[in-house]
Amino acid sequence: MDLFAPGIDLSQGILLASRVHRKYRPVFDGLSERDRAALALYFLPHRSKKDVLEVTRPRVIKWYCPFADQRAFPSGHRYCINVYSGCQHNCRYCYATGYAASYPRCRANFRADLTKDLDALDRYEVKPAPVHIANSTDPLQPLEREYKHTLFALEAIAQRRHRFTTVTVLTKNPAMLTTDPYIRVLHRLNRLTADHPRSAWFAERGISALRVECSLAFQGAEVCELLEPGCPAVESRLRAMRFLREEGLPVVMRIDPLFPRDPLPGGKALHDFGVPDIQPMAHLERLVEFGRGIGVGHVVYSVAKITRPRASALPTVMERIKSVYEHMAQGQPLVCRGGSWRLPDGPATQLVIGPFLDVCRRSSMAAKMCKANLLSTP
Ligand code: SF4
C-alpha cells in the first residue's frame, strides 16, 4: 500500500473519502485518488462511527464554508482562517454577527493549533489551495496590535507557501499592513518561488498569488460613524491602499456592501424611513475613480444583508433599512437566508446594483460580485 509518509495510510484516507457527505462530494470527486485521500485525512473525523462524514475535524485552517452545498456554492477546496472570534470594528451590517462570538476575543491556543494544522497539511501532502484571512472577523482589528496572531499566521503561511495558492487578506484596516514586519511578509507571500507547485500556472497567466482586499464602501464620516463605528477612518484606508499599490502589491477594493439610494420607487426617499443618504452616487464615483487611479485589480460588491446579531437586537439603522427593503420589494417578501434578510432578485436588487455597475463601466473598472470574486480566486 502506498504511503504518504511513514505512518500515513492511503487506504484509510480513501475509505474516509468514500463516506463524505454528498454536499462536499464534487470537491472530492474532482481529485486524484491520492489527493482525495489527503483531503479526507485532513478534514474528516478519523474515528467517527457515522456512515456519512462532514468536514468537522476541528481545524484553525478550516474548510471555507462547511455549511454550503458545493452543488449550489462551488467554493471547492479552499481554506479560511478566522484569526479572532468576533470583531471590534462593529459594523452594523456585519453578517457574521448572526453566528460569530458576541464579544471580540482571541482564540485559545491559536498559534499552537495553526502550527498543528500546517504540520498536518505537510504530513498528508495536501495539494495547495487558496486561503482566505478571514471571512468572519477582521484579522487586523485592534486586537492584532496586542496579540499579533495575524502576523504569526502570515509568517507561518509564508514558510509553508507550497501548501497554498492565493493568500487573501481581507480587512478594513490596511494601514497596519503598511508597517514592518507586515509589509515584508506580504512581499514574501506575493512571490512564488520556482519550486512552488503552481508557480508556472500563476506566471503563465500573470496572476498574483496574494490579494489584499480592502473594504471601503462609504466616504462620509457621519455615515461611517453610524454604520461601522469601530473602523479606521476613510483617509487612513485610502492612504494605505495607495501605499500598498506603490509597493507593487495587488490590492482589490471592496465597495461592499451597497445600500439603496434615492430616488426610491413610488416617489419615496430614504429620509422618509429615517435613513440618511448612505452612498450618494458622487461618493461611489469618487471611490471607483480612486481605485482606478491607484490601479486596483478590480472592485468587489454585494447588496447589504440585514442580519440580526445573535446576542442583541437589530440596530435601529438596520431596522430602518429593512423597512426600505420592504418598500423596494413592493409586496414580495424579503429573502430570508442564513439568518439574514436580503432584497429579492429582480428590479429591487437592480436598483441598487445597476447604477453602481454603470459607474464602474464608465471608469473602465472591472467589478465582481462578492460570490464571483471568491469563486474566481485561484
Ligand atoms: S470588519 Fe468585517 S468582520 Fe468586522 S464587524 Fe465589520 S463586516 Fe464584520
Image (cartoon, rainbow, N blue to C red):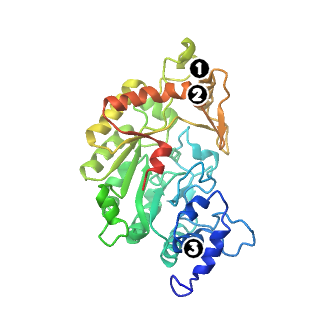
Q: The C terminus is located in which quarter?
A: bottom left
Write down the residue under mark 1: 273
Image height of 207 relative to 366, above or below: below
Q: Position of residue 359 (x, y in %)?
A: 36, 28
Image height of 149 relative to 96, above or below: below
Towards the viewer: 40 or 148: 40
Q: Secondary structure at mark 2?
A: helix
Q: What amino acid is labelled 2 in the image?
A: Ile
Q: Which mark is residue 37?
A: 3
- 10 Å crowding of disc 1: few (<14), some (14-19), many (20+): some
Residue 346 figure quarter? top right
Task: State if disc 1 and disc 3 touch (CB < 8 Å).
Answer: no
Residue 107 visible at all: no
Task: State if disc 2 and disc 1 touch (CB < 8 Å).
Answer: yes
What's the CA distance linking mark 1 and mark 2?
A: 8 Å
**Residue at image point 53% right, 87% down:** 6
Write down the residue under mark 2: 321
Of label 1 and label 2, which has the lower sequence position? Answer: 1
